[in-house]
Structure formats: structure tokens, C-alpha cells
């Protein structure tokens, strides 16, 4: 792991976030959790300070794996009210920006890693999930910009785009739609939150130290980036 991963923060309430917490703890890390970027920003002050008898200040890894309830339920774009659009497409971006801003002061001293986990619809889009795809792609753009800006400081940023079916049970409503491309690709039917967590730990390991700003697509090969 990152110089022997000791301190991690996981932000989000998705099934992936819970699996990442379990995997990090099994790997021996001390894990702090936050439900949102805003909650994380409040915790970051204490995490930067550390304490005489508590953990050392900072963090080796911050993982942001958000999920907005209802975001994987198919709905026509023309039926979205302004309030629904704000909740599904814009609020996740504001919260993700807050998470990134809070993460940098924690990660810079340790030359640590930030990992963003979003659905692969961020890249390909899909009928009925325009709001989710918009939020996820905007978060990817923010993370890529952070990767460029933070690289000289030794802070790596990894983007993991997992099959939407790994994120929440409600995603099953998308089976049979154009978002569901799993019928002819390697392992897509077996994609689970635990499988995503394995990849998160992989990019946080020694082999990921020369990587930053790239997107790993975990959908069994349905979408292959050049």
C-alpha cells in the first residue's frame, strides 16, 4: 500500500463505500468514514491535527464513493423538475468538490492518493440516467483536474468507473435498458461492491505510484476506452 497504508478516509454511503471500508480495515488501515463531502470537511480539521495519543495527522488515502438515492432509477429527462435535477445532477458535484478540497491538505504531507468511484454511465451515458451521468462525468472532470494540479506534490488521483449494478440495489431497474451491456462481456454479471473494493486497494498499492488521472472502467469490457 502507500508506504504501508495506515490512515484512510472513505466518503459516501454507497454499497461500494461500505465494501471499501471493510477491505481497508481487513488490510490493517485505520478508517474514518463520512457520509458526505460536507461531513468530511468538518472531520478534516481534526484529522489534520491528530493528537498526542491519537492517530498521526493526515491520511494516506481518501476514497470518495458517492451515491444519491434514486439516481439509478430510470426517468425521462423531460420529467425532471428543477429541484430533482439539482438533487440528482448538481448537488453531488458540489459535494464532490467539497470532498476534493478537504482531501488535499490531508493527503499532501503523506503524498497520498485520492480515489473517486463513480458509475461507468459517467462515460457512456444512458437513456433514463441523464442526471446521474451528468453528475458522474462532472466529478470525473474535477478529479482529472485535481490529478494534474496535485501531481507535482506527489498526490495521485485515481478514477474508477464501475458498472452501475455494483453501486446500489435500485440499479436493477436498469436491467434490459441500454445501460445494461453485460450479456456478452467478461465477468460483468459478477461485478460486486467487493470486486470494486479490490481494485481500489490495487491502485492504492505500490504499483499505482506512477499512475494518476486515468480512469479504470470496471464493467467486464462492455466499454473499452482507447
Image (spheres, rainbow, N blue to C red):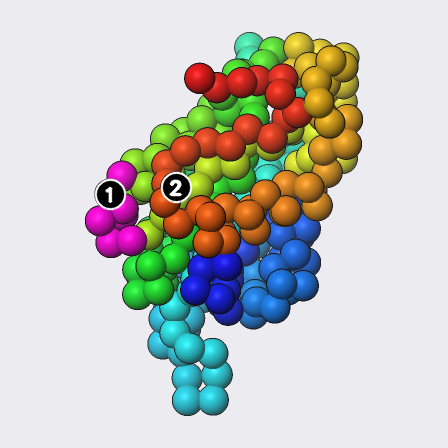
Q: State the image coordinates of residue 97 (x, y, percent, origin top left).
A: 37, 43
The residue located at (76%, 14%) in the rendering is: 183
The mark total stands at: 2
Mark 2 burial class by Cα count in 10 Å: few <14, some 14-19, many 20+? some
Alpha-carbon span between mark 2 and mark 1: 14 Å
Q: Which mark is residue 106?
A: none
Res 33 quadrant in image? bottom right
Question: In the image, 220: left or right of 64?
Answer: right
Mark 1 burial class by Cα count in 10 Å: few <14, some 14-19, many 20+? few
Q: Which residues are magenta?
A: 148-154
The residue located at (62%, 21%) in the rendering is: 221
Main SS of residues in magenta: helix
Q: State the image coordinates of residue 70 (x, y, percent, origin top left).
A: 66, 31
Q: Nearer the viewer, mark 2 or mark 1?
A: 2
Return the disc, 2 or 1, that comes first in the chain's sequence: 1
Q: Is residue 215 above or below residue 13?
A: above
138 or 202, nearer to the observer: 202
Res 173 quadrant in image? top right
The residue pinned by badge 1 equals 149
Q: Is residue 155 above or below residue 190?
A: below
Residue 118 in the magenta stretch? The answer is: no
Q: Is residue 7 above or below residue 175?
A: below
The residue pinned by badge 2 equals 211
The residue located at (47%, 89%) in the rendering is: 53
Q: Is residue 130 visible?
A: no
Q: Is residue 144 visible?
A: yes
Which quadrant of the rendered structure holds the C terminus?
Answer: top left
180 or 101, nearer to the observer: 180
Q: Secondary structure at mark 1?
A: helix
Amino acid at each position: 500500500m502507500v508506504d504501508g497504508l495506515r490512515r484512510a478516509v472513505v466518503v459516501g454511503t454507497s454499497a461500494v463505500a461500505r465494501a471499501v471500508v471493510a477491505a481497508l480495515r481487513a488490510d490493517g488501515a485505520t478508517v474514518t468514514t463520512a457520509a458526505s463531502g460536507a461531513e468530511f470537511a468538518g472531520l478534516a480539521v481534526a484529522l489534520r491535527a491528530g493528537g498526542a495519543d491519537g492517530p498521526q495527522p493526515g491520511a494516506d488515502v481518501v476514497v470518495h464513493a458517492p451515491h444519491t438515492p434514486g439516481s439509478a432509477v430510470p426517468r425521462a429527462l423531460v420529467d425532471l423538475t428543477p429541484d430533482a435535477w439539482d438533487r440528482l445532477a448538481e448537488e453531488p458535484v458540489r459535494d464532490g468538490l467539497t470532498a476534493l478540497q478537504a482531501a488535499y491538505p490531508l493527503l499532501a504531507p503523506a503524498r497520498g492518493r485520492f480515489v473517486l468511484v463513480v458509475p461507468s454511465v459517467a462515460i457512456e451515458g444512458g437513456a433514463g440516467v441523464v442526471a446521474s451521468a451528468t453528475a458522474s462525468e462532472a466529478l470525473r472532470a474535477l478529479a482529472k483536474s485535481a490529478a494534474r494540479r496535485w501531481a507535482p506534490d506527489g498526490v495521485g488521483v485515481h478514477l474508477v468507473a464501475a458498472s452501475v449494478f455494483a453501486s446500489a440495489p435500485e440499479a436493477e431497474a436498469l436491467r434490459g435498458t441500454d445501460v445494461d451491456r453485460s450479456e456478452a462481456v467478461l465477468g460483468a454479471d459478477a461485478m460486486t461492491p467487493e470486486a470494486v473494493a479490490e481494485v481500489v486497494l490495487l491502485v492504492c498499492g505500490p504499483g499505482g505510484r506512477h499512475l494518476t488521472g486515468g480512469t479504470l472502467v470496471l464493467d467486464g469490457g462492455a466499454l473499452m476506452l482507447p
